[in-house]
C-alpha cells in the first residue's frame, strides 16, 4: 500500500523535502502554523527562495500529491522539520520540536514512523520527543517507530544535495532506522548510513561545529595577516595546496540556521569539555564588531567623522534570501553603536525586512562614504562600479568576502580595502 506522508514545518528544509517526496509519487500533506505561508504554497507561490523550488512546487500541487494546511492529518509517516534556535543565553530552544511532536500524537496509528529532520542537541529524541510520543499509548519500537535523519544540505543547492548527499539515519531501534532508510530511498541516490538516534544527532552537530572552528581559525589568521603585511586570502590559497590542509575562509561573521547555532548545543551539553568550541563561537561572534571597528578606522584615516555606510548584502550567504543569524545585521548594529549612519541593500530580499534596508542600489549608495560588502551575491560580483554615483567623490569599499575585483573598483575611483589583507592597504586609486 502507498504510504502517506505528513511534513511538519514548511520552511527552508521542510518544503523542499515535501515537494521532493510528492514529485516522487508519494502522497504528502504539509503543515505549517504560518497561515500566510500555507496560503501562498497552496497557490503555488513561494515564501522562501531556493533554486528550482518554484517549478517543483507547481508540479507537486498540480499532481494533487501535495496538499497543505495548518493542522496535521493521519499519515503513515511524519517528518518534523521545524526550527531549533538558540535562546539569548545560547541555550537550545527545543519548544518547536516539543510542540510539533505533541501536535501529531492524536493522529498516530499503530505502525507509524516519526522522523526528526531538524538539527538538535544530542539526546533530543530521547529526552524531548519520546516523552511526548509515549502519550499515544503505542509501544515505542514495536508499534511506533522513531528516528533522526538530519538534513545535510546547503541553501541554493538543496535539491541537488537532497538527491546526491549521503544521509545519516539514527533509529531508536534498528527497525526504525531500516524503515526510514526505505522511505528516503524514494529519491536519495547517496548512501544511507544507519546508526542510533543519539549518534545521528551528534554527527550533524559535529559537522557544523567542525566548520565553525575552522572558520574561527581563518578569522584569527585574517587578523594576524593585517598586522604583518600579508593577504590572508592568498596565504590560505597557497596553504590549501597541501594535500592534508583545508583551511576555510574568513569573513564578517558566521550566519545561517546551523553553523552559527549548533556549536552552542555542545557547549551547553558539556561546557567543561567544549573549550575550543566555545572560543571559536566567541571568535566568530566577534567578527561583526571587528568589521565595524575596521570601517570606522578607515573613515577616520580619511578624516571622515560619523560617515555614511552602505551595507551590500543582508542574507547570511550569497545568492539566497535567508536572513537567519546573518552577520550582516550584526555588523549594522555595531556600526550604529559607533554613531555611523547605515543603509543596506540586498537584491535577493524583495520585501524590506530590515530597518536600514532600501529598495535600490542607487538609493543605497547615493550618500556613501564607505561601501561594505558582507554577502557575496553574484549581482555584487558583477556590479559595474563605474555606474555608482556617490556624494563622496572618492568613496571607500571594504570587501569582507574577497568577492570584488580590486582593479575594477580602483579604476572607478574607489579606495579598495579587503578584510584580512595587510599587503594592499587601500593603495591610491589608479
Image (spheres, rainbow, N blue to C red):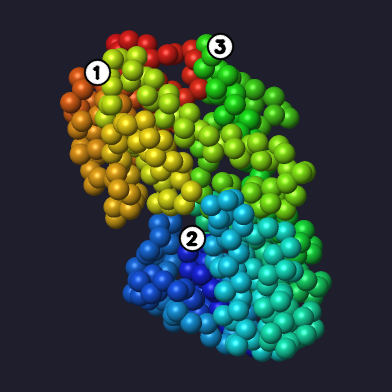
Q: Which residue is mark 2?
A: 12
Q: Nearer the viewer, residue 271 or 10?
A: 271
**Which numbered mark, 2 or 3, is in the foreground of this view?**
3
Residue 376 in which image quadrant: top left
First in residue order: circle 3 vs circle 1: 3
**Residue visible at 57% across and 80% down?**
103
Q: Judge left or right: residue 9 versus residue 125.
A: left
- Labelled disc at residue 71: none
Q: CA distance from mark 2 to mark 3?
A: 42 Å
Percent position of residue 72, x then y: 52, 82
Q: Name the residue nearer the viewer: 322 or 240.
A: 322
Determine the residue positioned at 58% across, 47% down: 259
From the viewer's perspective, tell me whether residue 80 is left or right of residue 196: left
Using a 10 Å C-alpha cutoff, classify the residue at mark 1 as few (fewer than 14 neighbours), some (14 to 19) or many (20 or more). some
Does residue 79 appear anywhere in the picture?
no
Residue 262 appears in the picture as rendered: yes
Circle 2 sits in a helix, a strand or a loop, which is it?
Answer: loop
Up the image or down, 313 lies above or below 424; here it is below
**Residue sitting at 44 percent across and 13 percent down?**
424
376 with respect to 84 (left or right): left
Q: Tell whether label 1 touches label 2 (CB within 8 Å).
A: no
Label 2–label 3 contact, CB within 8 A: no
* Mark 2 or mark 3: whose residue is earlier in sequence: 2
Above/below status of 382 relative to 119: above
User: Disc 3 marks which residue?
Assistant: 228
Disc 3/disc 1 C-alpha distance (Å): 27 Å
* Residue position for label 1: 394
Amino acid at each position: 500500500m502507498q504510504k502517506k506522508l505528513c511534513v511538519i514545518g514548511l520552511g527552508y528544509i521542510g518544503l523542499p523535502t515535501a515537494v521532493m517526496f510528492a514529485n516522487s509519487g508519494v502522497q504528502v500533506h504539509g503543515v505549517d502554523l504560518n497561515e500566510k505561508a500555507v496560503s501562498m504554497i497552496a497557490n503555488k507561490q513561494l515564501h522562501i527562495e531556493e533554486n528550482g523550488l518554484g517549478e517543483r512546487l507547481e508540479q507537486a500541487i498540480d499532481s494533487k500529491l501535495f496538499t497543505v494546511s495548518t493542522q496535521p492529518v493521519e499519515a503513515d509517516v511524519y517528518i518534523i522539520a521545524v526550527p531549533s534556535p538558540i535562546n539569548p543565553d545560547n541555550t537550545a530552544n527545543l519548544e518547536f520540536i516539543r510542540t510539533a511532536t505533541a501536535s501529531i500524537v492524536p493522529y498516530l496509528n499503530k505502525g507509524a514512523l516519526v522522523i526528526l529532520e531538524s538539527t538538535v542537541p544530542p539526546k533530543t529524541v530521547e529526552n524531548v520527543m519520546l516523552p511526548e510520543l509515549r502519550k499515544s499509548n503505542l509501544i515505542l519500537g514495536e508499534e511506533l517507530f522513531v528516528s533522526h535523519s538530519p538534513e545535510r544540505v546547503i541553501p541554493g543547492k538543496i535539491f541537488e544535495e537532497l538527491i546526491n548527499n549521503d544521509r545519516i539515519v539514527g533509529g531508536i531501534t534498528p527497525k526504525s532506522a531500516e524503515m526510514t532508510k526505505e522511505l528516503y530511498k524514494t529519491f536519495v541516490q547517496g548512501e544511507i548510513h544507519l546508526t542510533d538516534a543519539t549518534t545521528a544527532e551528534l554527527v550533524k552537530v559535529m559537522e557544523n561545529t567542525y566548520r565553525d572552528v575552522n572558520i574561527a581559525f581563518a578569522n584569527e589568521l585574517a587578523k594576524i595577516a593585517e598586522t604583518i603585511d600579508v593577504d590572508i586570502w592568498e596565504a590560505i590559497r597557497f596553504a590549501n595546496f597541501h594535500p592534508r590542509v583545508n583551511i576555510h575562509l574568513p569573513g564578517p561573521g558566521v550566519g545561517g540556521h546551523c553553523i552559527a547555532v549548533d556549536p552552542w548545543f555542545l557547549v551547553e551539553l558539556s561546557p567543561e569539555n567544549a573549550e575550543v568550541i566555545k572560543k571559536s563561537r566567541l571568535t566568530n561572534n566577534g567578527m561583526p564588531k571587528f568589521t565595524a571597528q575596521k570601517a570606522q578606522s578607515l573613515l577616520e584615516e580619511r578624516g571622515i567623522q560619523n560617515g555614511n555606510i552602505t551595507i551590500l548584502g543582508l542574507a547570511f550567504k550569497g545568492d539566497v534570501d535567508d536572513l537567519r543569524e546573518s552577520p550582516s545585521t550584526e555588523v549594522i548594529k555595531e556600526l550604529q553603536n559607533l554613531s555611523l549612519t547605515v543603509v543596506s541593500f540586498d537584491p535577493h530580499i524583495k520585501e524590506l525586512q530590515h530597518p536600514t534596508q532600501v529598495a535600490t542600489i542607487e538609493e543605497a549608495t547615493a550618500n556613501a562614504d564607505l561601501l561594505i560588502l558582507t554577502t557575496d551575491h553574484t549581482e555584487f560580483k558583477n556590479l559595474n562600479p563605474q555606474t555608482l554615483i556617490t556624494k563622496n567623490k572618492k568613496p571607500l569599499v571594504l570587501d569582507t568576502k574577497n568577492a570584488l575585483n580590486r582593479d575594477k573598483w580602483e579604476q572607478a575611483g574607489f579606495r579598495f580595502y579587503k578584510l584580512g589583507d595587510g599587503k594592499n592597504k587601500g593603495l591610491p586609486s589608479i
